[in-house]
Amino acid sequence: MPIAIIESLDHEGRGVTRQDGKAVFVDGALPGERVEYVVRRARPTYEQADTVRILRASAQRVSPRCKHYGTCGGCSMQHLDAVAQAAAKQRILEDALWHIGKIRPEIVFPAIQGPAWGYRYRARLGVRVVPSKGGVRVGFHERRSSYIVDMRECPVLPPRISALLPRLREMIADLSIADRLPQVEIAIGDAVTVFVFRNLLPFSRADVKRIAAFADAEGIQAWQQPQGPDSAVPLHPLEAPELAYTLPEFDVRMDFRPTDFTQVNVHVNRLLIRRSMQLLDPRPGERIADLFCGLGNFSLPIARRGARLIGIEGSDALVARALDNARRNRLDGLTEFHAANLFEATEDSLAALGPLDKLLIDPPREGAIAVVKAIGPQQQPARIVYVSCNPATLARDAAVLVREKGYVLKGAGIANMFPQTSHVESIAVFERAARE
């Protein structure tokens, strides 16, 4: 088997080396390590491989905490020290900005970090009935597979949720439609935890009784979702407190449904909002737009600072939630929210928002290329804060802002929203270049 010295990490957390002119991506290897590996897939210009033996280990290597590590596809970097993970993600962000966008930030911000374990307040667990492997399996997908890991623990989930996974598996095994229940979605608020059972067939009376007993014993709410996300409704108890998370620094409470999009990591989300507000610096009298605003995660803190906020989101349901949250927080006098497809943004559609002093953008992985291209002479905010979950699309969009729209990339840095994984969340700030 070949032996190599690992040069770097790629954006998926794999070790990278070169052999005979080919890039070789080695799962489980770290920079500086000398490893023996086996090629899993060979292509003309690259190879994918797995580590077989570590001949010289990195000083940053640690023992993975989870017994499912290596099988489960949920985490890929548990073998790397948590501080080193953040540093590696910073390099991934900087490399993307340079190699894709051909730009460098004037300042690299310190990484935003929170707890390395027990941080995951949202999860979607797969469910499969596999008689040949002991019955029901509940967990994340295996790496590079559609199979489900039979998870008995998950240290990135809060400890009490991780501890109840075996009992969840036992309860599901007793249901009459266990083979027609493909997933369980977990949503955790500050005071409420909801398990949403995706049921392809109606539950029997005995099923409902079994689920209710489980919910009472574990202190959770059980919901059922017979069709799409909007079909989710309480199963037991039928009347209970709503899910919510708070942003104490901004005196804001955000109510949400368990199938709504919210950030997975509540600790890092609070720190990310703090930095966003520091960079955006909203002030009374300013008009600021929050594009891809969701249920108002950044919008309401902006309004709390006294600025006039215009939120745009593609989902009618999330727009309704944002409006409701603004009312509950007594910020409806400073906010307005509208539904629009921002992937089809034009210069005219942005101009229709009226003059904007500043702009916050928080798009999905696809980025905001239509938005940045649509910034025209009638709509040129002095400052743009861009929150990204994909360094590649951030770099692409940043190149347009800098080269075509006259902005300067003042700073960028990562927010380690998903410790133990290769996912890179980041934040960047752009300012209009000074006119000569």
Image (cartoon, grey):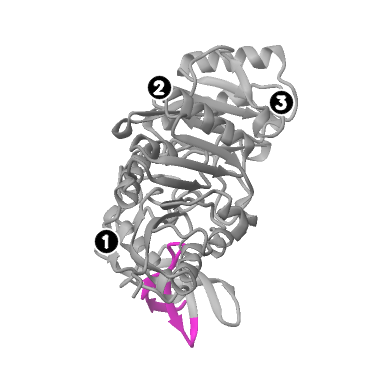
Location of the C terminus (image quadrant) = bottom left
Amino acid type of disc 3?
Answer: Ile
Q: CA distance from mark 2 to mark 1?
A: 37 Å
Name the residue furthest right.
201
Residue marked by disc 2: 191
| Relative height, residue 95 to residue 130 (above, below) | below
Residue marked by disc 1: 60
The answer to which of 418 and 98 lies nearer the viewer is: 98
Viewer-side label of 2, 3 = 2
The answer to which of 346 and 15 lies nearer the viewer is: 346
Question: Circle 3 — which element?
Answer: loop
Question: Circle 2 — which element?
Answer: loop
The dot on residue 303 is none
| Relative height, residue 10 to residue 342 (above, below) | below
Q: Is residue 119 highlighted in magenta?
A: no
Name the residue furthest left.
59
Q: CA distance from mark 1 to mark 3?
A: 46 Å
Q: Crowding near pointer 1: few (<14 within 10 Å), some, many (20+)?
A: some
Q: Is residue 209 left or right of residue 166?
A: right
Residue 330, image x, y percentages: 42, 25
Q: Crowding near pointer 2: few (<14 within 10 Å), some, many (20+)?
A: few
Residue marked by disc 3: 177
Which stretch did the figure color magenta? 1-22
Question: Circle 1 — which element?
Answer: loop
Q: Is residue 270 left or right of residue 299?
A: left
Amino acid type of disc 1?
Answer: Gln
Q: CA distance from mark 2 to mark 3?
A: 30 Å
Residue 426, image x, y percentages: 39, 56
The answer to which of 111 and 193 lies nearer the viewer is: 111
| Relative height, residue 46 to residue 58 (above, below) | below
CB atoms of marks 2 and 3 within 8 Å: no
